[in-house]
Structure formats: structure tokens, C-alpha cells
Image: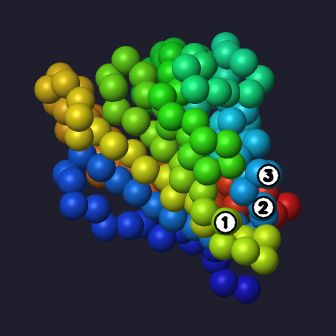
Amino acid sequence: MSQVRAEILSVENPNTAAARIVINAPAAKIFDLLADPRAHARFDGSGTITESISGPARLYEGAKFGMAMKIKVPYRITNTVVSFEENKKITWCHLMKWTWSYELEDLGNGQTQVTEIFDGNSIPSISKWWLKKTGSIARNPKWMAKSLVALKALCEG
């Protein structure tokens, strides 16, 4: 049996990363996990989310949710949902203003293509400095691919 992998997409913008996978599950099932901040640690391929600490059980546009995180040291971050299209797209950002998006496309036959996008192009200079300093842009594609593989396993399992 071959190992499941997500496709890391080539992107034109330097502060952007994207990955894609096909999941054998309906978009609604996948979106339910994406819209539940308590589920995020279960498919986090970066290993940086330790737990959901605040927010609604189901996200919506304008919703705020807090996460306990750890990258070398523990910290907390509050995210705001800035785009929400039921079963199609969810995007959130935090203080540094970069966004994380999940876009779902129904392929028919119970299959859904899921694309995860990190966009740090329209962010303040200090945020761009932070991305470069921490090496996040270099790590994000691999972490995103791992997250999508974990999301696929959860939805198909």
C-alpha cells in the first residue's frame, strides 16, 4: 500500500504556500471539522496547536477563537474568521494578519478536493520580518501537507 501524500502546490507569491488533497468524503463532513476549532489539534500537521481554549463550537464569519500553541515556547493566539462559505471555504487570521484558508470543491462521487492556503502577502512589514525570521514560509508547505493527510485520515476513517 502506498503512502498517502498531499500535493504541495507551486505558488507565485513569496509569502504564500498551498497544498491540496482529495478526500473520499462529502464536503459537509470535512467542513464540519474545519468549522470546529476544538478539532483543529487533531489534524494539525505542524504539531504547534496544543488545544482550543476559547470560541464557539462551530465557527462563522466574524467568530473569534483562541488556541494554545507552542513553537519552542508556549503562547496563545486569537483568530478571527474573515471568510465563511458553508461547505466551500473558511479563512481566518490573527494579530499578524496572515490568513489560513481551506477551500473545498465537490468532485462528485463522494470525493472532495481540499486546498489549504497560507497567505502572508498583504501583511505589515513586521509580520513579513517575523515569517522570515522564524522560517515559517519554508516549513509551512510540509506542515500543510501533513495537516491535509491527517484531515483525510479523520474524514475517511
Q: What residue is disc 3 on?
A: 29
Residue at the far front: name it: 85
Label number found at residue 106? 1
Looking at the image, how many numbered discs can be counted on the residues? 3
Q: Which residue is mark 2?
A: 26
Q: Estimate the spatial distance between the alpha carbons at disc 1 and disc 3, rounded to whole Å.
A: 12 Å
Q: Nearer the viewer, mark 1 or mark 3?
A: 1
Which residue occupies 19% across, 24% down?
Answer: 124
Q: Residue drawn 64% across and 27% down?
A: 60
Dot 1 or dot 3, earlier in sequence = 3
Tell me if label 3 and label 2 are in contact, CB under 8 Å.
yes
Q: Is residue 88 visible?
A: yes
Q: In the image, what residue type sits under mark 3? A: Lys
The relative height of residue 23 versus residue 130 in the rendered view (above or below) is: below
Cα distance, mark 3 to mark 2?
6 Å
Disc 3 secondary structure class: helix
Asked if residue 147 can be seen in this view, the reply is: no
Q: Earlier in the sequence, mark 1 or mark 2?
A: 2
Query: Is 13 placed left or right of 100 in the picture?
Result: left
Residue 29 in picture, x, y percent from top left:
79, 52
Q: Amino acid at mark 1?
A: Asp
Q: Residue flagged by tag 2: what amino acid is it? A: Pro
Residue 9 vertical placement versus 14 (above, below): below
Instruction: Indicate the quadrant containing the C terminus: top left, top right, bottom left or bottom right.
Output: bottom right
Q: Nearer the viewer, residue 62 or 147?
A: 62
Near mark 3 (Cα within 10 A), the count class, few <14, some 14-19 or many ≥20, is: few
